[in-house]
């Protein structure tokens, strides 16, 4: 017997199936109704309860009156010359957020870069999102909504979603509860059906957050934005280093690698004349040698109003060669979507159309 609901409609989109199961039990229904509804939403794109034909009519009637499925609105879709696509999405309260689709046909990878917050409170010197300031956290509904919109776009191009990275607007570990709830939907076989190795969280390095992921039992890949081999230089680029010095989270790298059974990635954004010399490379080797980790070198993507420049390509290659020669696995990532302000560090929730 279905119980009477409260006046406020219950959100069912972007909610982990186990939570939905508990909810259905609380209204006098069977837990497995949650999986049925998730299949309708994520596999069949059906949001009208009356069309969910394997549900009892009484439940369909109840859902029509008492449940909602909230998706963001696509305000703008900008396509880059290199194939990347940026979605400017409007949320239910009118706030805007950006999501980027990054195709790599050669490797058969179709990656969606998600945002976890509107703005960011950590103010990294080189990041457009940080210049916005912090507005609010995103809910799991809003995070999954980004992925749903991008996933369907990828499907329409004849491809399939393969990877998700939390590298968009915001610091994922500063909104970790909602990020983990969203990841549960992504991993579920009645959600997006992704494997743990297909989901990556990028962070400035918040020790309590890293520990909390381990306690959650979820095992996404972890990337830490390092960008300098010492606290003094790092603090000039990333003020949060004063609160979270390298020593506060570096010991967690082997712990997380053992837990997830995957190496941790150090992201190293390179700036001309600031952190790109062989002296810096040597200090970086000393800092991380022996850790179960690799380095992803990212030439800086310029942001309006920021007095920083990317290094010459030869400097990037020399830096990489030094790391490789000293036993550090190092790759170079040239970001896509620069011409639509969709590359790493450029997201600021604004229109790029002229």
Image (tube, rainbow, N blue to C red):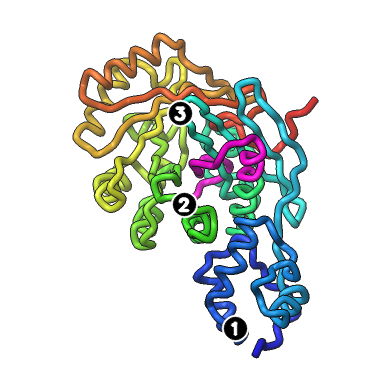
Numbered disc 2: secondary structure: helix
Label 2 – label 3 distance at C-alpha: 29 Å
Q: Tell me, yes or no, if residue 290 can be seen here.
A: yes
Which residue is at a point 62% across and 39% down the rendered structure image? 154
Q: Secondary structure at mark 3?
A: helix
* Separation (CA) of disc 1 from disc 3: 45 Å
Q: Residue 168 lies in magenta, yes or no? A: yes
Mark 1 residue element: loop
**In x, y percent, where is residue 193?**
49, 53
* Residue 158 at x, y percent in the picture: 62, 36
Residue wearing tag 1: 29
User: How many numbered circles does the render carry?
Assistant: 3
Q: Residue at x 52, y 27 (%)?
A: 105
Q: Which mark sits nearer the N-terminus, 1 or 2? A: 1
Residue ID at (34%, 12%): 318
* Magenta span of residues: 150-173
Label ID, residue 173: 2
Nearer to us in this view, 287 or 199: 199
**Image spot of residue 303 (x, y percent):** 61, 26
Residue 230 lies in the magenta stretch = no
Position of the C terminus by quadrant:
top right
Tag 3 residue: 107
Q: Residues within 10 Å of mark 3 (few under 14, many from 20)?
A: few
């Amino acid at each position: 017997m279905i119980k009477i609901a409260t006046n406020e409609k219950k959100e069912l989109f972007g909610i982990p199936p186990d939570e939905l199961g508990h909810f259905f039990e609380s209204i006098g229904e069977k837990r497995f109704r949650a999986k049925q509804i998730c299949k309708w939403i994520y596999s069949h794109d059906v949001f009208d309860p009356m069309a969910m034909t394997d549900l009892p009519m009484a439940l369909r009637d109840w859902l029509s009156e008492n449940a909602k499925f909230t998706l963001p609105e696509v305000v703008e879709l900008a396509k880059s010359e290199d194939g990347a696509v940026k979605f400017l999405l409007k949320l239910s309260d009118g706030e805007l957020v950006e999501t980027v689709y990054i195709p790599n046909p050669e490797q058969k990878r179709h990656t969606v870069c998600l945002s976890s917050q509107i703005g960011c409170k950590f103010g990294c010197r080189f990041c457009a999102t940080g210049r916005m300031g912090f507005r609010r956290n995103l809910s799991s509904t809003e995070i999954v909504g980004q992925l749903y919109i991008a996933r369907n776009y990828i499907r329409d191009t004849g491809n399939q979603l393969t990877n998700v990275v939390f590298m968009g607007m915001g610091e994922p570990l500063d909104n970790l509860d909602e990020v983990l709830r969203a990841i549960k939907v992504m991993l579920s076989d009645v959600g997006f059906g992704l494997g743990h190795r297909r989901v990556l969280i990028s962070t400035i390095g918040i020790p309590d957050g890293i520990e909390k992921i381990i306690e959650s039992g979820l095992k996404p890949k972890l990337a830490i934005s390092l960008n300098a081999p010492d606290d003094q230089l790092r603090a000039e680029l990333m003020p949060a280093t004063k609160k979270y010095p390298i020593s506060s989270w570096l010991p967690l790298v082997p712990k997380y690698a053992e837990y997830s059974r995957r190496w941790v990635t150090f992201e190293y954004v390179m700036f001309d004349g600031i952190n790109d010399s062989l002296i810096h490379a040597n200090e970086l080797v000393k800092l991380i040698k022996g850790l179960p980790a690799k380095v992803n070198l990212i030439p800086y993507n310029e942001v309006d109003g920021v007095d920083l420049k990317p290094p010459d390509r030869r400097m990037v290659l020399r830096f990489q060669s030094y790391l490789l020669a000293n036993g550090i696995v190092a790759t170079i990532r040239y970001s896509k979507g620069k011409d639509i302000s969709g590359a790493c560090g450029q997201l600021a929730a604004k229109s790029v159309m002229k």
